[in-house]
Amino acid sequence: MTMETNRILLRPWCDSDAGALFKYASDPEVGPRAGWPPHKSVEESLEIIHTIFNNDTTWAIVLKERGEAIGAMGYLSASDTNLPAREGEPLIGYWVGKPFWNQGICTEALKLMIGHIRKTTDITSLISSHFLDNPASGRVMEKCGFVATGETCVDEGLSGSSRPMRVLRLEL
Ligand SMILES: CC(C)(COP(=O)(O)OP(=O)(O)OC[C@H]1O[C@@H](n2cnc3c(N)ncnc32)[C@H](O)[C@@H]1OP(=O)(O)O)[C@@H](O)C(=O)NCCC(=O)NCCS
């Protein structure tokens, strides 16, 4: 399943994205903000394409003018996390390569995915979270209509650390 705006495509990841994925996901400014370590090799990036990204609800964010994957957008079960999710409520996740920050790309990609979820699923709400020291991510969620639940919890499930997080929810 592929979705698009004038500027971006959301499409499944493929093996030929491994080089671009490594270029942007090896940046130490990116992964740790989302709770995952920087990629260490193109081989590791390819392995992630084959495993973590190999499902129907994870997309590459492709900037059409570059024809290159510059980030990821998706949702997955929140049940493996310690977030206060409702039964069956998915957790969203995303990142964008640093050269492309603050151009509205993530907000555009998240709105596209939310529209797709509304049209094609029975999902009634989405949960999300971000580290308190990563306000840009919270801003993306707010621009897409997410509302803070007022709860803060520890992201031990994803990062193994105990950094505080803000939890937000979107009612669909
Ligand atoms: C968070 C991230 C995905 C945002 O992507 P992006 O394409 O730059 O997002 P957008 O341009 O759509 O929106 C960013 C918003 O954050 C704001 N922002 C940026 N830095 C900020 C800061 N330090 N404090 C507060 N707001 C900030 C921008 O001004 C913009 O809001 P605005 O449109 O109201 O001005 C990107 O920075 C990223 O990949 N970070 C590393 C990984 C990550 O944090 N993933 C999410 C984990 S929860």
Image (cartoon, rainbow, N blue to C red):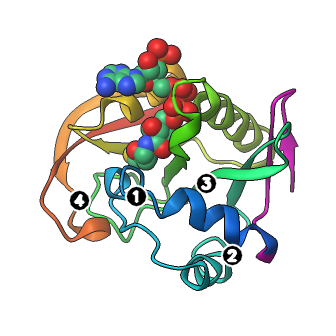
What type is the residue that disc 2 sits on?
Asn
Q: Give the spatial CA distance, label 1 vs label 3.
A: 15 Å
Question: Mark 4 or mark 3, which is nearer the start of the sequence?
Answer: 3
| Quadrant hosting residue 52 | bottom right
Q: Considering the numbered disc 2 on the image, is that residue within a helix, a strand or a loop?
A: loop
Residue 74 — which label?
3
Q: Which residue is mark 4?
A: 155
Q: Give the spatial CA distance, label 2 vs label 1.
A: 18 Å
Quadrant for ligand 1 reads top left
| Quadrant hosting residue 147 | top left
Residue 71 location in percent, x, y? 62, 50
- Examine the rendered structure and indicate whether residue 39 appears above or below residue 46: above
Question: The magenta stretch spans which residues?
Answer: 1-15
Disc 3 vs disc 4: Cβ atoms closer than 8 Å?
Answer: no
Residue 65 location in percent, x, y? 85, 36
Question: Mark 3 or mark 2, which is nearer the start of the sequence?
Answer: 2
